[in-house]
Amino acid sequence: MLCRQWLNPPPGVLPFPGTLNERMAAIEQNQLERKELEEKIARGEIDKPAPGKHCTSWDVISDYNLDPR
């Protein structure tokens, strides 16, 4: 049953990937925006954004006891 749901998902569950031309245009647009941002940072017009928090950060403290029983 899981295979059938994966091959035929309900409408709206998986986004339509679009045509190859649409995906390539989106990639080129993203590269152009990133290049413009890097140029502005190099010229000093804007500050470099602070790096985001990594998902592997150890800031979360768990109360789960791992001691042997």
Image (tube, grey):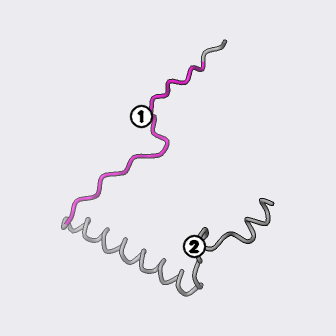
Question: CB atoms at circles 1 and 2 under 8 Å apart?
Answer: no
What kind of element bears circle 2?
Answer: loop
Q: Is residue 11 left or right of residue 35?
A: right
Instruction: Identify the image quadrant of the N terminus.
Output: bottom right
Q: Which residue is located at x 79 percent, y 63 percent?
A: 3
Instruction: Identify the image quadrant of the C terminus.
Output: top right
Q: Which residue is located at x 60 percent, y 15 percent?
A: 67
Secondary structure mostly seen in the magenta stretch: loop
Q: Quadrant of residue 21?
A: bottom right
On whether residue 9 falls in the magenta region, the answer is no
**Mark 2 = which residue?**
15
Q: Position of residue 68 (x, y in %)?
A: 65, 14
**Mark 1 = which residue?**
59
Which of the two labelled residues, at mark 1 and mark 2, occupies the earlier sequence position? 2
Q: Which residue is located at x 26 percent, y 66 percent?
A: 42
How many residues crowd mark 1 within 10 Å: few (<14), some (14–19), many (20+)? few
Magenta part of the chain: 46-66
Q: Is residue 57 left or right of residue 46?
A: right
Tell me the distance, in whole angstroms, between the alpha carbons under discs 1 and 2. 33 Å
Q: Position of residue 6 (x, y in %)?
A: 73, 65
